[in-house]
Image (cartoon, grey):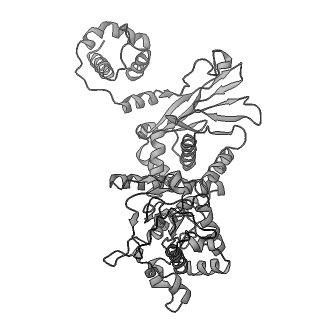
C-alpha cells in the first residue's frame, strides 16, 4: 500500500464517516460505502474490504477530517458510468390488501436523468415492480392496473413525491419545481429560458456534461404542470388519475379541464379574501345603520323603514362604484370594495389579488370586455347564493357604457347592489366632460365614502391596471399553448401570485383571512 493511497483511503473514510455513510453496527463497511470507495479509488470491492480490515481501528479512533461533499460523490459515481440514485418504490410486497403480501417482481431498470436544484443533472436508475395477482405495475410516482388495456389509468400516490416523473426518462426534484414556479411568476420567464439558465449554471461540470442530457423547455413546462396538478389534487382532497395510453402531450388534458372548471367563478382560493389593509369603515352621514338585520322587503335590498328605503334609492340612482376592471382577468378582488355582513363598512379585496383569468390582448395586455359578457361575468363571479360577497363598487374604465347596457336591459339586480364609477385615471384622461351618463352616474368623485379626510383617494383605483401589466407579461409564455393548458397555466400564475401577496400582508400584520361561509351568505343593505 503506497503512502499516497494510504492517506487518500484514510481521508475518504473519515470524511464519509461524518456523513454516516461509513460502517454498519457490526463494524463492517456498508455495501454502499464499499462500492463508492471502489469507484473513487479505482480498486476492487475485495481490495477495499481488505484495506478496511487493516486500517479501520486507526480511522475510527480519530475524526479529524471534514465531511465529503455530495457533489464530490455525485461526480465520482457519474464519471464511473453508474447511476447516482435508484428511484425505488417503498414496498417489496404488493400494498393491495387483497393480495395478502404477494412479493413484487422487479422489471429491468430504466436509465433516466434527474434534474435537481442543488446537485445539478444526475443519471439515475428507475425500476418498476409488478404484482402477478392484481396485475398492477408500480412506478415511482404512480401505479397502473392492467396496463395493456386502452382504458388503463395512471393513479398517482397521495402526497407530493420527492422527485416528479415528467416522462419515463426525465425526473425533476421538488425544489427545482418550486424554483421553476418562481421563475415563471416573478420574472415571467418562458420554459425555454428557464432551461437555458439551468443548463448554463447548474449542469455539474464540463467532464460530466456529456453524461446527462441538458434540461429542455418541454421538460420544464411539463414538470410545472404535473407538480401543479399534484398540488391541486392535495388541496382538493383528490387523487390524480390520468390515461396511461395515448400521446403524452394529451395525457393531462382531462385533468386540466376538471381543474379549470373548479376554478371558474368562485374557485380561486383567495376569492373570499379580506384583510385590514383593504377594509375601510364608513359611517353614513345620514345616521342610517348600514348593518340593518331586518328582513328585506319583496323586490328591495332594504327593509320597509323609510330612511333605509331612501338610502337604497339614493344608492341605486347614484350607482356607487369602486372596482376597477380593465381585463378578462375575471374578477379582480384587488379593487373590489365590498360591504361586509359584520358591520356598516366598506372593504376591498387584497391589493393585487385576482380571481380568474381569460384571453390576453396583444396591445393592451387585456381586451375590453363586451358589455353583455361583463354583465354575465359579474353574476358568475358573485353568484346569488353569496349575497355578502357582492361588491358595493366596481371600477371599470368603460363603466358608463356598462351602466347604459344594464339600464336598457332592466338589470336591477346589479344596479340595485353595485355602483359603477370609472376608475380615477380613465375618468380624468379619457372620458368627456360633457358625457352626461358618465358624469352623473360614473364620476368617482360622486362617492364620498371613497375619499379620505385629506381629500385623497382611499383606494388605489389603478391596481387592477398594474396587475394587468403583470398579467400581460405572459403573452410570450402562453402563445403556443392549447386552450386547456393556457387557462390552467394562467390560473396557476394567479394562485401563486396571490399566495405571495397573502404572505406579504401577513408580514405587514394586515391579518389576511377568508370570509366565513356565514358572512358570504348574508346580505347587508347598502
Q: Residue at x 56, y 41 (%)?
A: 230
Horizontally, is 149 left or right of 187 in the view? right
| Residue 411 position by quadrant | bottom right
Most foreground residue, 339 or 423 = 339
Horizontally, is 133 left or right of 25 in the view? right
Q: Residue furthest right?
A: 150
Q: Residue furthest bottom?
A: 434
Percent coordinates x, y for residue 413 in the rendering:
62, 70
Task: Locate the N terminus by quadrant.
Answer: top left
Q: Residue at x 41, y 16 (%)?
A: 34
Percent coordinates x, y for residue 428 in the rendering:
44, 84
Compared to residue 444, the image places residue 264 above or below, namely: above
Most foreground residue, 162 or 269 = 269
Percent coordinates x, y for residue 122 in the rendering:
48, 35
| Residue 146 position by quadrant | top right
Whether residue 367 is visible to the viewer of this picture, yes or no, is no
Compared to residue 476, the image places residue 53 above or below, namely: above
> Total of numbered circles in the picture?
0
Whether residue 295 is visible to the viewer of this picture, yes or no, is yes
Q: Residue at x 41, y 78 (%)?
A: 448
Most foreground residue, 67 or 346 = 346
Percent coordinates x, y for residue 38 in the rendering:
41, 18
Amino acid at each position: 500500500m503506497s503512502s499516497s493511497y494510504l492517506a487518500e483511503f484514510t481521508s475518504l473514510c473519515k470524511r464519509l464517516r461524518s456523513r454516516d455513510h461509513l460502517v454498519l453496527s457490526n463494524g463492517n463497511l456498508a455495501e454502499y460505502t464499499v462500492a463508492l470507495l471502489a469507484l473513487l479509488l479505482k480498486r476492487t470491492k475485495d481490495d477495499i474490504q481488505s484495506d478496511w480490515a487493516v486500517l479501520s481501528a486507526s480511522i475510527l479512533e480519530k475524526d479529524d477530517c471534514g465531511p465529503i461533499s455530495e457533489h464530490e460523490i455525485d461526480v465520482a459515481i457519474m464519471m464511473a458510468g453508474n447511476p447516482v440514485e435508484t428511484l425505488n418504490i417503498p414496498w417489496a410486497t404488493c400494498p393491495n390488501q387483497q393480495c395478502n403480501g404477494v412479493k413484487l417482481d422487479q422489471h429491468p431498470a430504466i436509465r433516466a436523468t434527474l434534474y435537481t436544484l442543488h446537485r445539478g443533472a444526475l443519471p439515475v436508475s428507475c425500476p418498476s415492480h409488478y404484482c402477478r395477482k392484481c396485475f398492477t405495475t408500480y412506478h415511482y410516482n404512480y401505479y397502473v392496473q392492467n396496463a395493456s388495456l386502452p382504458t388503463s389509468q395512471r393513479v398517482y400516490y397521495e402526497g407530493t413525491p420527492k422527485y416528479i416523473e415528467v416522462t419515463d426518462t426525465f425526473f425533476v426534484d421538488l425544489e427545482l419545481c418550486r424554483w421553476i414556479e418562481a421563475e415563471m411568476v416573478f420574472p415571467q420567464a418562458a420554459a425555454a429560458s428557464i432551461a437555458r439558465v439551468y443548463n448554463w449554471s447548474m449542469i455539474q461540470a464540463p467532464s460530466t456534461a456529456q453524461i446527462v442530457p441538458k434540461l429542455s423547455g418541454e421538460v420544464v413546462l411539463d414538470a410545472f404542470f404535473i407538480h401543479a396538478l399534484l398540488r391541486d389534487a392535495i388541496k382538493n382532497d383528490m387523487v390524480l388519475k390520468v390515461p396511461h395510453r395515448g400521446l403524452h402531450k394529451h395525457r393531462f388534458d382531462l385533468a386540466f379541464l376538471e381543474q379549470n372548471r373548479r376554478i371558474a367563478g368562485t374557485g380561486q382560493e383567495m376569492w373570499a379574501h379580506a384583510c385590514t389593509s383593504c377594509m375601510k369603515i364608513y359611517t353614513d352621514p345620514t345616521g342610517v345603520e348600514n348593518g340593518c338585520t331586518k328582513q328585506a322587503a319583496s323586490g328591495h335590498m332594504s327593509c320597509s323603514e323609510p330612511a333605509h328605503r331612501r338610502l337604497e334609492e339614493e344608492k341605486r340612482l347614484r350607482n356607487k362604484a369602486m372596482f376597477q376592471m380593465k381585463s378578462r382577468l375575471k374578477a379582480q378582488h384587488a379593487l373590489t370594495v365590498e360591504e361586509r355582513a359584520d358591520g356598516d363598512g366598506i372593504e376591498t379585496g387584497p391589493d393585487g389579488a385576482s380571481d380568474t383569468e381569460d384571453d390576453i390582448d396583444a396591445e393592451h395586455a387585456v381586451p375590453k370586455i363586451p358589455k353583455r359578457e361583463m354583465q354575465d361575468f359579474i353574476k358568475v363571479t358573485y353568484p346569488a347564493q353569496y349575497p355578502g360577497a357582492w361588491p358595493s363598487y366596481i371600477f371599470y374604465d368603460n363603466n358608463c357604457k356598462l351602466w347604459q347596457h344594464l339600464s336598457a336591459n332592466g338589470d336591477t339586480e346589479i344596479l340595485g347592489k353595485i355602483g359603477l364609477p370609472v376608475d380615477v385615471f380613465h375618468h380624468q384622461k379619457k372620458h368627456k366632460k360633457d358625457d352626461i351618463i358618465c358624469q352623473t352616474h360614473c364620476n368617482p368623485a360622486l362617492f364620498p365614502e371613497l375619499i379620505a379626510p385629506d381629500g385623497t383617494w382611499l383606494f388605489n383605483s389603478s391596481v387592477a391596471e398594474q396587475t394587468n401589466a403583470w398579467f400581460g407579461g405572459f403573452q410570450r409564455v402562453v402563445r403556443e399553448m392549447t386552450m386547456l393548458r393556457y387557462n390552467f397555466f394562467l390560473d396557476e400564475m394567479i394562485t401563486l401570485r396571490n399566495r405571495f401577496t397573502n404572505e406579504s400582508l401577513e408580514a405587514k400584520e394586515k391579518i389576511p383571512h377568508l370570509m366565513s361561509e356565514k358572512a358570504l351568505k348574508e346580505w347587508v343593505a347598502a
